[in-house]
Image: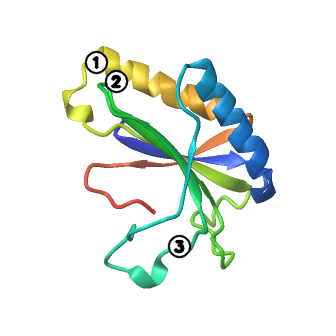
Amino acid sequence: MQACEYGLVCATDDEALLVKNVNAFLAAQGWRPLYRKQPTGLRNPERPDLEPQYSHYYCQFHKQSPRWYFDLYPNADKRGVLRFPEHPQAGWTLFFNHPGHETDTPEELAQLDALCGHIAAGTGFAAVLLHTYQAGEDRH
């Protein structure tokens, strides 16, 4: 798996509890807490009119091999537009990516897949797989 996105079955207002749960999971692993960021750049440069508008999101990453990145975005942007309208029960989305996965060993890939599941479980909310991204595919 290169990248996938889960929907977290919760309300957008569950943000504080979601961040608290994920930070507790990260602390238990000896990792830094989530970063709160303001979005920059375009997800889909071919259709900037469809670009979601967010005030902030959360992310964390690991730069050493095997590398990984994940972020948490609300499913609804500031205008109320859902990124995944077929999953309105998902208040937040969890995106997990394995940058540089081409050079990872099968053992590392298995560990990263397990880590993705552990992070999803660490949110404290049920997670529903929304999309698995293929190589070269733009993010929703």
Is the residue marked by circle 2 packed among few (<14), some (14-19), or many (20+) residues within 10 Å?
some
In this rendering, is residue 48 above or below 14? Answer: below
Q: Amino acid at mark 1?
A: Pro
Instruction: Residue under label 2, please give it.
Output: 109
At numbered mark 2, what does the secondary structure look like: helix, strand or loop? helix
Which mark's residue is nearer the viewer, 3 or 2?
Answer: 3
Find out whether the residues at labels 1 and 2 contact each other: C-beta distance under 8 Å.
yes
In this rendering, is residue 59 above or below 109? Answer: below
What is the spatial separation of the Cα atoms under label 1 and label 3, in whole angstroms? 35 Å
Q: Nearer the viewer, residue 61 or 124?
A: 61
In this rendering, is residue 42 above or below 70? Answer: below
Q: Nearer the viewer, residue 134 or 62?
A: 62
Instruction: Residue under label 3, please give it.
Output: 52
Residue, far bottom: 49
Q: Residue at x 39, y 43 (%)?
A: 3
Q: Residue at x 69, y 75 (%)?
A: 80
Q: Position of residue 88 (x, y in %)?
A: 71, 61
Instruction: Residue under label 1, please give it.
Output: 106
In this rendering, is residue 97 above or below 86? Answer: above
Q: Amino acid at mark 3?
A: Pro
Q: Position of residue 106 (x, y in %)?
A: 28, 18
Whichever of callouts 3 and 2 sits on the residue coming sooner in the sequence is 3
Q: Quadrant of residue 103?
A: top left
Can the viewer see residue 105 in this picture?
yes
Is the residue marked by circle 1 packed among few (<14), some (14-19), or many (20+) residues within 10 Å?
few
Find out whether the residues at labels 3 and 2 contact each other: C-beta distance under 8 Å.
no
Q: Quadrant of residue 90?
A: bottom right
Can the viewer see residue 123 in this picture?
no
At numbered mark 3, what does the secondary structure look like: helix, strand or loop? loop
